[in-house]
Structures are given as C-alpha cells and as structure tokens.
Amino acid sequence: MKGIILAGGRGTRLRPITHTGPKQLVPVANKPVLEYAIEDLKDAGITEIGVVLGNLGREAIQQHLGDCSEYGVEITYIIQGNPLGLAHAAGCAREFVGDDDFVMYLGDNILDNGVVELVESFEAGDYAAGIALQRVANPEQFGVADVDENGNVLKLVEKPDDPPSNLALIGMYVFSPAIFDAIETLEPSWRGELEITDAIQSLLQDGHAIDSHVVEGWWKDTGKPEDILEANRLVLETIDDTRNGTIETNAEISGTIDLAESATIESGAVVRGPVSIAEGTTIKSDTYVGPFTSIGKDCEVEHTHIENSVIIGESEVSASGKIVDSLIGRNAQVKSAEGLLPEGRRLVVGENSNLKL
Amino acid sequence: MRIITHTCPDCGTVVAANELEKNRVMKCPRLDCNTVLRFEDLPDSEREHFLEHRDQYQI
Ligand SMILES: [Zn+2]
C-alpha cells in the first residue's frame, strides 16, 4: 500500500494567510496540517508517500518536509501543475503507484481517527476502491453515497436535491490500480476538472465493488480561517500535557499545556489550557492565554487577553483588550494604540484581510 | 482523458505534461535535484497527443 497526499490548490479562502505560503503548511496546534496526513498514513503502515504539488507552494512544502527521514517515510514529489482535478492528481501518480493499492488523502484535511480503519475495511474484501463517509446534517451540499447494508457503494451523487442518504464523501479514499483505467475514460467536467467521483462512478458501472467506511470521529477540511480555529480546538482537546518550558513562580497555570522547552510563561501571566506554546515564545506578565489557543514559535504576548485563537509565529501581540476567535499570520504586530495622538486605531492591513474592530 | 507524465531519471520526481510543455526546458522541480527535464523527453506519441488536445490540459 502506498499513499498520495494532495497538496496543491491556491488556498484562496485562507487569504491573506495563503498569500505567503500554501494552506497545507498552516499550523493546527502548532503543527502544519500536512504533517497530520503524513502521520496518519504512517500509522496505517504506509511509508512510501507521493506528495502532489500544484503551481503554488512547491518550494515551501519541499523545504518543510525536507527528505522526510525524521518522519520515517520516503517522499516522492508529483508535480501536477495546473489544477485539473482530483482524478488528474491521482492519474499523475500512476507510475509512482505501479501495481500497488494506495490511499489518497487531501492534504488540507484532518481526521480524528486517521485512516487505519478505512484501509482495513478496504483490505477485508475484493474492492476496486474504498471511500470514507461521514454523516452530515446537510447532505445536499456534498457528494453523497448510497450504500447497502454491508457498506457496498451503490451510487454516488454530487450535491443532490434529493439525497439518498446523509453519508457525505470526505477527502479520503483507497484505490486499487483499476482507478487509473477509469480515470483515462473520463472527460473534464463543466468546471474543466477530472472528477474523482466520476472515476469511482465509472468503476461501479464496470461492475467493480466499492467499499465504504463511515468515519465516526471528527473530520475537518481546513479551507477557511474558522475551520483552522475549529480544527485547532479539536486537536488541542487531545494533546498531552508536556510542560517542558519555563514556568515562573506566580504564573497561574491550569488545564493541559503543551509548552516547548525554550518557551516561557512569566510570573503574573495566566494560562488556561488546553493551550500549545511553541519554541522561543514568551507569555509575559499581565497576560491571559485562554483555552484553545496555539501560539507559534518566537512570539511575545503581553498585556493581552487571548483565547480560542491561533498565532502562527514570530509575532508580537501586546494590544490591551480581548482577542478571540482570531488567526494571526506570521510576523504580525498587534499592539495598543493607547496614548497615541490623534486617538484612533492604526492599521497596515494586507489584501484580503478581515478585521472586526 | 489521457494523463501524461515524465519521471526525472535521477530523483523520481513525476512531472505532468502541462508543466513540461509550459516550460519546454526546466530544472527538475525537486529542490535538491539539478537534472534538466525537457518536453522533448516524452515519447513522440505522447507529445503529439498532448499538443492535439492541449486545451484539456489547461484550466
Ligand atoms: Zn529530479
């Protein structure tokens, strides 16, 4: 079994954060989203991984992953170039995959329970493909599967007006090499892409059995800022308490804290977990860091009340008042305007930013 | 739709035909590989197919 992780896309819904880097490297609980995919594949015993790259973020992703020896996996890069669809991305991996089965994992998705069960379910039968499904309240907004009582897929429908079930396709698949011939038969859809659901539908029409696995834990597509915050919250709920950094006396700490070795919580600061604080970061006195907050490397946070937020890294935050539900990009300065004349807020805001003052 | 790729002989990086055709001659996209890849490295039949159906490979 091999793995392919799709790491293309323009990340337009995550601007301005994605003006300077690919969405797959946005951190959730201080770890880039893409690393969760690699870890999940590794947990399923998959160590040969193809990372499909689009037109943007190629260098950044390669630089981040390096040779991947620290993960214990071997990475092959697959340059898809133009975003011609998920089935095109899979098709580009044909030579890499060879005669193996493979898991296809969307690199901006995070799954609570990984892909082990999906893979085991697929391997338990003679299937051409396996799809991960999740029960949703609004199936008309998803690709939806009609399945029989044994989990065999009968039909797939895209955003149906009259959904045959509430089981939505999420971005995880297992394929046998039969998918490649199915992809060759496809024509681009109305949006100019080769659709993976069309490829699976084509397998069904040719009489292949398709397995499904209903994912019970949470699943998050991290395409938008609010999704990053939600994924950050979900992951922080599961972290271990690792207080490796410095906690000065008279700092008030409670809950689960993931504190990196070179991070400091100064005397007079209040930190209520679950919270993750990365290397080189200092939480100064007179600061409150509340639950579900991740603060990246080399930040200074002072005089601020912050909760349910992600600070990506290398930032200074010292504004008085509360910061909640916020995503703060790298190397940002959020300071107080107090005492400055004329009175008023001072903003240098990038394109596609979103502020509520 | 036929998907055409070329694999770097030195590092195994796979490059889709649209990328090769756009650049004609390019450094392998893998950061630590300096091998030069060319659209002409593809077999004649694949190049002809790509050029005849070029629109399908653009978006
Ligand atoms: Zn190369």
Image (cartoon, coloured by chain):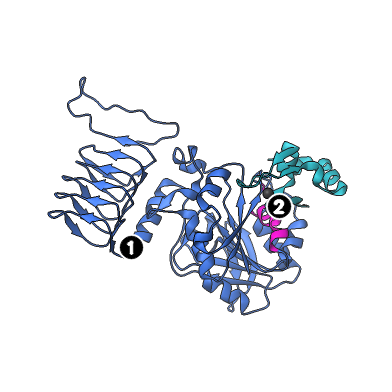
* Quarter of the image where the N terminus of chain A is located: bottom right
Q: Which color has been applied to chain A in this rendered view?
A: blue
User: Is the residue at mark 2 in contact range of ligand 1, meaning its CB lies under 8 Å from it?
Assistant: yes
Instruction: Identify the disc placed on residue B10.
Output: 2
Asked where in the image residue A157 lies, by quadrant, the reply is bottom right
Q: Tell whether A173 sits left or right of A208.
A: left
Residue B13 magenta-highlighted: no
Residue B35 location (% of width, % of height): 70, 45
Magenta-tinted stretch:
A84-97
**Residue neighbourhood size for the residue with mark 2, other residues' Cα within 10 Å, grouped as few (<14), some (14–19), many (≥20):** few
Return the mark for residue A237. Answer: 1
Check the rendered structure and report the hue given to chain B.
cyan
Q: Is residue A166 visible in this depiction of the protein?
A: no
Position of B19 compared to A150: left or right?
right
Residue A139 image offset from top left, x and y in percent = 52, 60
Above or below, A64 against A335 in this view is below
